[in-house]
């Protein structure tokens, strides 16, 4: 059984990963191409680095994608 404290730890790791992953996958592939980035690479980064991956995505990839819109 998961206790309250363990649930918070899981959510702290899971929520940023899910939000970043949804954003990566919902972004149009043409925008990824125009920004010179790989959607697949960012999916892997977000999944393999649960804390750092979403942070890197928001700091590095997201501004470049927004510049292409």
Image: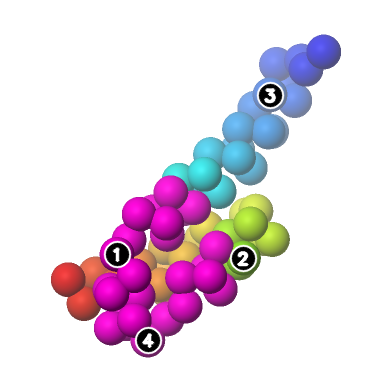
**Which element type, helix, strand or loop, lies under badge 4?**
loop
Quickly name the residue at label 4.
36
Label 1 and label 2: CA atoms lie apart by 17 Å
Q: Position of residue 14 (x, y in %)?
A: 60, 40
Q: Is residue 67 visible?
A: no
**Which element type, helix, strand or loop, lies under badge 1?**
loop
Quadrant including the N terminus? top right
Q: Is residue 21 visible?
A: yes
**Does the residue at mark 3 contact the one at mark 1 (Cβ under 8 Å)?**
no
Quickly name the residue at label 3.
7
From the viewer's perspective, tell me whether residue 17 is left or right of residue 64: right
From the viewer's perspective, tell me whether residue 54 is left or right of residue 30: right
Q: Position of residue 20 (x, y in %)?
A: 46, 53
Quickly name the residue at label 1.
28
**Which element type, helix, strand or loop, lies under badge 2?**
helix
From the viewer's perspective, tell me whether residue 65 is left or right of residue 55: left
Examine the image and state in which quarter residue 4 appears.
Answer: top right
Label 2 and label 4: CA atoms lie apart by 17 Å
Image point (63%, 57%), residue name: 47
Sequence-first tag of 2 and 4: 4
Q: Name the residue furthest right.
A: 1
For discs 2 and 3, the disc positioned in front in the rendered view: 2
Image point (53%, 39%), residue name: 15
Sequence-first tag of 3 and 1: 3
Q: Which residues are magenta?
A: 20-43
Say if the magenta span includes residue 14: no
Label 3 and label 1: CA atoms lie apart by 33 Å
Quickly name the residue at label 2.
44
Badge 4: residue crowd in 10 Å (few <14, some 14–19, many ≥20): few
Sequence-first tag of 1 and 2: 1
């Amino acid at each position: 059984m998961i206790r309250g404290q363990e649930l918070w730890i899981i959510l702290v790791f899971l929520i940023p990963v899910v939000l970043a992953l949804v954003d990566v996958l919902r972004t149009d592939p043409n925008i990824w191409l125009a920004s010179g980035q790989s959607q697949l690479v960012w999916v892997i980064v977000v999944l393999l680095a649960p804390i750092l991956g979403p942070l890197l995505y928001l700091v590095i990839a997201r501004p470049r994608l927004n510049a292409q819109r």
